[in-house]
Amino acid sequence: MGKQAVNPFLPSYEYIPDSEPYVFDGRVYIYGSHDAYRVKRWCYNNYASWSAPVTDLSDWRYEGVMFQREEDPTYKPGESFMHAPDATRGEDGKYYLYYPMGGLGVAVSDTPSGPFRFLGRVQYKDGREYGSLWGDPMIDDPAVLCDNGHVYLYTGYATRRPQNTERLDELGRRYVGAYCTELESDMITVKGEAKLIVPGANYAEGTSFEQNEFFEASGIRKIGEKYYFVYSSHRLHDLCYAISDYPDRDFKYGGIIISNADIGLSDTPRAFVGNNHGNIVKIGDEWYVFYHRQTGKGGARQACAEKIKINPDGSIDQVEVTSQGLNGKPLVARGKHCAYIACNIFETAIEDKDSELCYKQDGTDGEECAQYVHGMQDGSTVGYKYFELDGRENKITLTFKCDSNAIIEIRRDSECGDMCATVKLSPSTEWTSTTADFRCTNGTHALYFTYRGDGSASLLDFEIE
């Protein structure tokens, strides 16, 4: 079996959320934050660069550190962290990286992968920083678009709880929605006034955004002659979109593209609920949404992607989270699969207990080591979507650790579907393999693994033969 693309699409020890995907010169590049394993704080590491050829989305290559926070002269050790960035190719052919760290920094590079060098901070013509004046938008999660000789900058943040008066922070910065402002051709100087384009909580009444107000995570794309603004709503876990004929006004709510817990497609969360951030991109002839999943381990989020369809009327239907991701088609079932590619992870039988269910690794941050599913207890379920089976598969081997005698039930299509296998587990403190009979009808199926019994178990991988 050849290499297949899976979710998360980067190595399991790499944590890059908030990814903005772009295609430059035949390769897909992502620009995102950089979380650290075993560190509860988000965006702890320097920006890292990864890319893949458009012809093989399973072949991601580490390009190195894209930008080091120490290069920003305002950097303060232990205090300055670089949250979600964005990038664009300017009219001059150079690449510009926009990142929030105190204010809004800009770095420039001759190549899309960097390294980027500090250029300056977005500022007014008189030298005062954008975001520093009373009534300026909150500087958070910037997005940038070069369009027909114009440079548009998007940023903003909004509270999740409605306020009776305009929400300002202690510096007088607006917390009321997403804003767009035009920059000069130097990519750094503010040219026009900031315009509110998508309202936040308490400002959307009577608009198309009511119940789907902006919270954070600005993203922008131009598709044909339409402008798509992608953002995280006040629900946090979903990515919504809005459409306009203009880059800086008249946006109308479109819908939800994806929820990282499949909320909206399921009555209950099917994965860890948490913040979400990403954007859409066309790779070859297909469109994809990039987003991140929560691992259940604090500030360690991972980049994922799903194929989407832009309908003839310009709308985008909500898509589900999957294990196949950028593969673009179901995974070939025969072969060995890492347990951490589970796209669904949830519990149904645990009450009044502390849950330890999560994706986990034993190594330190940045160390090349395998992630696995940890803390499965009675009723814990992990699901994989989707596999292509020919109906002749007859064995499945699980690699696990377990502190009790238990079983894992494997069912097709849902956690309540037809049984494909019952695998007996025995106590083991080391990774141990066990094999059971496996039966499943041919076709495309999801597989769900549910733990039954006392104690808990960890699952490293499984092989279908």
Image (cartoon, rainbow, N blue to C red):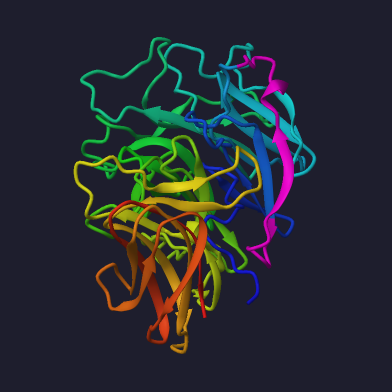
Give the magenta range: 52-77
Q: Quadrant of residue 298?
A: top left
Q: Quadrant of residue 213?
A: top left
Q: Residue 390's spot in the image, x, y percent?
A: 47, 87
| Residue at 31% over, 19% down | 167
Q: Nearer the viewer, residue 463 or 259?
A: 463
- Nearer-the-camera pick, 35 or 281: 35
Task: Give the residue furthest to the bottom.
Answer: 392
Position above or below: 177 against 313: above
**Residue at coordinates 22% horizontally, 54% vertically from top-left?**
349
Whether residue 375 is visible = yes
Residue at 39 percent of width and 76 percent of height: 445
- The relative height of residue 160 versus residue 405 in the rendered view (above or below) is above
Q: Is 63 covered by the magenta stretch? A: yes
Give the image quarter of residue 209.
Answer: top left
Q: Is residue 153 above or below residue 345?
A: above
Name the foreground residue: 449 vs 223: 449
Residue 440 is situated, as x and y percent measured from the top left of the image, at 38, 83
Residue 421 picture location, percent across and down: 36, 76
Q: Please identify the quadrant where the N terminus is shown.
A: bottom right
Up/down of 369 relative to 421, above or below: above
Judged left or right of residue 63, residue 383 is left
